[in-house]
Every structure is written in structure tokens, then in C-alpha cells.
Amino acid sequence: MRTTNDSTAAAILPLVGGAANVTSVAHCMTRLRLGLRDRTLVHEDALRSLPAVLGVVADDDSYQIVLGPGTVARVTPEFEALVTGTADTAGAPATGTAGAPATSTAGVLAARGAEWKVARRQRNATPLKLLLRRIANIFVPLIPALIGCGVIAGLNGLLINLGWLPSLTPALAAIASGFMALIAVFVGHHTAKEFGGTPILGGAVAAIIVYAGVAKVTAFGMTLAPGQGGVLGALAAALLGTYVEKWCRRRVPEALDVLVTPTVTVLVAGLVTLYALMYAAGELSTAVGAGANWLLDHTGVFAGLVLGGLFLPLVMLGLHQALIPLHTTLIQQQGYTVLLPVLAMAGAGQVGAALAVYVRLHHDLSLRTTIRSALPAGLLGVGEPLIYGVSLPLGRPFVTACAGGAAGGAFVGFFSTLGDKIGSTAIGPSGWALFPLLKGTGGLALTAAVYAGGLLTGYVVGFVATYFFGLGRTVAGAGALGGGGTVSGVCDSSKEGKDTDPGGNPPP
């Protein structure tokens, strides 16, 4: 009997060119990530029309289909089974209205959003951004374990505070902490895999960092501590090991390769890790933690304003990926990252902006349908459908959404200056999905209240800013889908080939 997940996987496969066009299958928190041989075989309009698909994001490395948390983890194995176990029998595009020319405002905005994604992908093909993307590929597979352990750690903290089940809390602490104690090994494994080395050798070199015996090693006149350098040290150690391994592969005779290459790789990279990288990465990790805390303790409102306001543009530029190692370092070092709740306010501003568009453009039934379908995902922190389907193509609402994020970030930052810091024990979720992962200095109730207050501030400011300043001219037209009504300046400017928003301004 076919399940919903089976049906979703079966519906997606022919729309991405069939099994023969798929070179790799993976997933992160919300997206099915596909490697495709020929992207011209993708029927994107039909793909977007599938009920389970929340959006599509294409970059230089992969074609990403946004399915949302939970769903993607269930659809991916079904999709992979279809790719590896069935012949390609469906290469034709789906029939129906999905592939028809977009005549509604929602269709025009979806097309414009697709154009922005193509342009962004072209701008992002720089060495720095490609490097950041590869670093993100190292840490994204770790997110499910971070979330699971983070939720268990939060539950354990609640039980300890309430004094309940004292015989169970040590077991929960062990379960929650085991992964974090060895996260350096996983980072090393994925680093070597991403940069073309042998994954197990990357893990072996990174394992040196967490080995208890390093406490007997002295470097720079100081005794090393197990775990010193954390994930940053593991990343650097595995990267060095990968380059040593490649150097050996080019020079060692094949007959000796199986013995010499692994030995030299682990020995050279291990010695450099012990006598240089652990110390340097430890200093850097300490500076990251101290810097993040100082920033929010002393410039909380300003820092929250800047971080919350700029996160959506960072996402558009691909620069947000640079924050993943910082989040992971803070979680490993302090137990939670103080940056994520502030950055999550950008999603709140996005939701508020979308609600304002929904209210203002009450005649445009097609656009309102798009917003209704994307809002639940937006509330749970999956912002791509709203970004690419609504705010970015319209132009001004993207800017006013950033204003909402800035206001929410400033709200959270203000409480940090009062000593009530809040953080997340894992990365990945945001929006309402972040509540189970919250941890702070003021207790669970206060931490949740501050975060909820930030979300509410982001919603309100994003809504008000968009309602009064984000849409420019007055909404006009009859409004019914197919009834000829349009948003003044949207469909008309599209017909004229101008890249303008309803207020006549170019997108940001």
C-alpha cells in the first residue's frame, strides 16, 4: 500500500528528469538535496505545484527541494529507493495546469523569484562562497543529532530543576552529552569526505583532539586539555590530513600505498594537530565564545538589530553558512549558541511581512493562496517559500521583512544586556520549532518568554512596516483569480519587462 511519502517521492522523480538524471541524493533539515546531470530536464513549475513541495532552491552544488522538517527525512529514503531500484520510465513533464504560463500575480512572482535565484547562484560562484558552502556541507549532516541531543538535554535540565526522576537524569545527561563529546570525530570524518580524502582517516586525526591522553602532552609550555580546539580544531586537522593524504597518493608507489599513506597521513597531521592546531584552535574557540557573549552583553540592542536585520540578506548571499561552525563551537563550549535566537528573528519579520501582503492585497486570490500555503512552514522557520514566492520578487516587502527581523533581534538583545541571555542547544530549527531547544541564564519560563516576545515583535514590526511602506501604491483590480484583477504595478510592470516592485522600486 502506497503511503503519502511514497507518493511524494514518486511524483518528484519524473519532474527532476527521472532516475537516470539523478547523481546523488541527500537531505538536510528541510530540503531534499539532489545532484542532477542535466538541470534542463527539471520541470520546475510542475514540481512547485506538488502539495508536499514548499519551494525549490538551486545552487552550484545541488538542486534542493524544500519539503519541511520531518517530511524530508521520510521522503528521502523512498526517493533514493526509487532512484536506485527502478528504471527511468517517467521523463515527460507532468500534464495539467502546472506547466501553463503564469497569468496570475502569484505565477508572475514565482517566475520573478526563480529569476532572482538564478542571478544569486551566478553571483555566488566565488571562491569564498564556494568554500563556505563546502564548510556547510560538513556540518549539515550533524544537525539531526544536534537537535535530538539538544531536546534531550533540555528535558533533562527541566527534570533536574523540578527535582523529578533523579535516578533517570544521569542517564539522560549521558545520552545528551555523548554525541557532543565526540563531535570532533564526526566533523573530521565529513571534512575529509567533502575535500576528497578518506573519511575514516579524517576521523582518526580529529579523534586525537578528544582523546584523554592529550592531557600528558605539553605544547607552547602548556599542557593540552582533551577537546581543546573543538570543532574548529577538528576541521583544521582533518583538512590538513586530507592534503597530506593526497600528497602521499601522488608520490608513494602503489605497492606501498596501503601501508605508507595512512601512516604518514595520521602521523604528520596528528603531530601538527597536537603541537600547533589544538592550541591555535583552542584560542580561537575561546575568542569566539567570549566575543559572542561580550557582543550581546554590552551592545545587545545594537547587535540584535544588526544580526536580525541582516540575516535574510546573508542567506541570499550564501554568507550565513559561515555561522555554522560558530554555532557549533558555542554549543560545544557553552552548551548553547546565543546567536541563533537572535538570527531567528529574521524569519519572524518575514512572516509579518507576508501577513501584511495577504491583508493589503485582498483582491489577489492567487497570491493569497500562495501565502496561506507557505505561512505554516514560515512559522516553523522554513522561510524559502515566502522569500522566493512573495517578499523578494515584490522587492520592498523583503526590506520591510528585514526591518521586522531587526526589531525582534533588538528585543532579544535588550534582555541580554539585562543578564537574561537566551540560546539554543542545537542548530537547524527556528521559529516556533526552536522552543524545545531553548536554554538561557534566567530559567526556562523567562527564556521562552523572551524568545516569544522577540517573535511577536518581529511579526508586528514586519507587518506594520510592510503594510504602510512595503507595497507602495494602492491595491487595485477586481481581485478574483482569473477575473482580470491585478496588483497595481506588479503584473503591469512584468508585462512591460521591467524589474520593479508594486511601488516602482527595484528589488534589493
Image: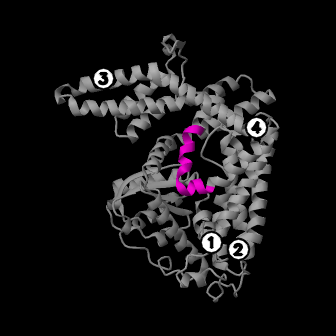
Find the distance from the CA under tag 3 to the CA under tag 4: 48 Å
Residue drawn at x 53%, y 16% is: 224
Q: Residues within 10 Å of mark 2 (few under 14, many from 20)?
A: many
Q: Nearer the viewer, mark 4 or mark 1?
A: 4
Q: Nearer the viewer, mark 3 or mark 4?
A: 4
Marks 4 and 2, how far apart at CA: 36 Å
Closer to viewer: mark 2 or mark 3: 2
Left or right of residue 8, residue 146 in this image: right
Marked residue nearer the N-terminal end (2 or 3): 3
Three-letter residue code for mark 4: His
Residue 382 percent location from the top left of the image: 61, 56
Q: Which amino acid is tagged 1?
A: Leu
Q: Tell me the CA gap for discs 1 and 3.
A: 56 Å
Front position in the image: 275 or 484: 275
Q: Is residue 119 visible?
A: yes
Residue beneath disc 3: 264
Q: CA distance from mark 1 to mark 2?
A: 8 Å
Relative vertical location of residue 142 with respect to residue 406 in this rendering, above or below: above
Residue drawn at x 50%, y 10% is 216
Q: CA distance from mark 2 to mark 3?
A: 63 Å
Decide: few, some or many residues near mark 4? Use Cα within 10 Å; few <14, some 14-19, many ≥20: some
Name the disc covering residue 109, or none.
none
| First of labels 1, 3 by sequence position | 3
Q: Range of the magenta residues?
A: 312-326
- Identify the residue under disc 2: 471
Q: Which mark is residue 394?
A: 1
